[in-house]
Image (cartoon, rainbow, N blue to C red):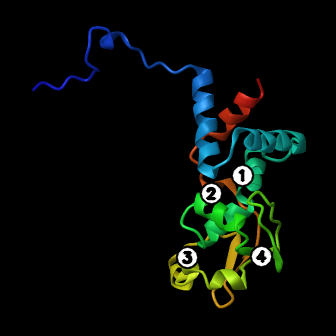
């Protein structure tokens, strides 16, 4: 059997896979949007907010990463309470986490420096969180987060940076996409 580098059929060899500039920008946007598990409108609102806050002296890409990384569901994932961002979003939606000792069930809740994220007492009895302390010991945290294993509590110690996060997409092309 001969394996050819193209699809079968008469017209398969004529197919071109040249991606336009628009297609490249769209692909980069979709990568970042899907990485954080956001819908189009929510992602677009973050982009608009960053465009408004841009003062010229601040890096616009870094502002976007700070916005996306300081979401409650992302912080829960980064702290190691959940194995994926989707699972973290579900845990937050079910009300398993407290922010500064107040129940918050909004995954897009924006956290600030000094905020404490802890597991609720009711959630500690759930099977999903039974062996969480052993899993948290293995977790490597970003520099902007601190965790207290005894209390099962994390704290925002700084601001996330684009260097430490390493997003899977080229952020400048995302801004080019939305500036059309």
Per the image, label 2 sits on a secondary structure element best described as helix
Residue drawn at 73 percent across, 71 percent down: 95
Q: Earlier in the sequence, mark 4 or mark 1?
A: 1
> In terms of secondary structure, where does tag 4 sit?
strand
Where 81 sits versus 41, above or below? Answer: below
Using a 10 Å C-alpha cutoff, classify the residue at mark 3 as few (fewer than 14 neighbours), some (14 to 19) or many (20 or more).
Answer: few
Instruction: Determine whether label 3 and label 1 are within 8 Å by CB.
Output: no
Which class describes the residues within 10 Å of circle 1: few (<14), some (14-19), or many (20+)?
Answer: many
Crowd rating for badge 4 (residues with CA inside 10 Å; few <14, some 14–19, many 20+)? some
The residue identified by callout 1 is 65
Q: Is residue 62 left or right of residue 163?
A: right
x and y percentages locating residue 15 in the rendered image: 38, 13
Real-space Cα distance between discs 3 and 1?
A: 29 Å
Mark sitting earlier along the chain (3/4) = 4
- Is the residue marked by circle 2 packed among few (<14), some (14-19), or many (20+) residues within 10 Å? few
Mark 3 vs mark 2, CA separation in Å:
27 Å
Q: Kindly report the distance in space between the C-alpha atoms of the residues bearing marks 4 and 1.
A: 23 Å
Residue under label 4, please give it. 98
Q: How far separated are the C-alphas under marks 2 and 4?
A: 24 Å
Tag 3 residue:
128
Q: What separation in Å lies between label 3 and label 4 (alpha carbons)? A: 17 Å
Number of the front mark, 4 or 1: 4
Could you tell me which residue is drawn at 50 percent across and 78 percent down? 138
Q: Residue at image x 73%, y 74%?
A: 97
- Residue labelled with disc 2: 165
Position of the N terminus, as image quadrant, is top left
The answer to whether the residue labelled 1 contacts the one labelled 2, judged by CB atoms less than 8 Å apart, is yes
* 153 relative to 26, above or below: below
Q: Nearer the viewer, residue 29 or 163?
A: 29
Q: Residue 16: where, in percent of width, then height?
A: 41, 15
Q: Which circle's residue, 1 or 2, is located before the other in the chain?
A: 1
């Amino acid at each position: 059997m001969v394996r050819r580098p193209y699809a079968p059929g008469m017209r398969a060899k004529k197919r071109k896979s040249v991606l336009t500039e628009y297609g490249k920008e769209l692909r980069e946007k979709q990568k970042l949007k899907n990485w954080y598990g956001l819908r189009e409108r929510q992602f677009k609102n973050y982009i608009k907010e960053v465009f408004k806050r841009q003062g010229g002296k601040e890096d616009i890409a870094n502002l976007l990463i700070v916005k996306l990384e300081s979401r409650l569901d992302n912080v829960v994932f980064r702290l190691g309470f959940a194995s994926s961002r989707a699972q973290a979003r579900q845990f937050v939606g079910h009300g398993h986490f407290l922010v500064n000792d107040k129940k918050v069930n909004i995954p897009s809740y924006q956290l600030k420096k000094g905020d404490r994220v802890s597991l609720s007492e009711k959630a500690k009895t759930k099977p999903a969180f039974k062996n969480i302390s052993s899993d948290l010991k293995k977790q490597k945290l970003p520099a902007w987060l601190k965790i207290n294993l005894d209390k099962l509590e994390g704290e925002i110690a700084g601001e996330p940076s684009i260097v430490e996060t390493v997003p899977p997409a080229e952020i400048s092309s995302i801004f080019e996409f939305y500036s059309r």
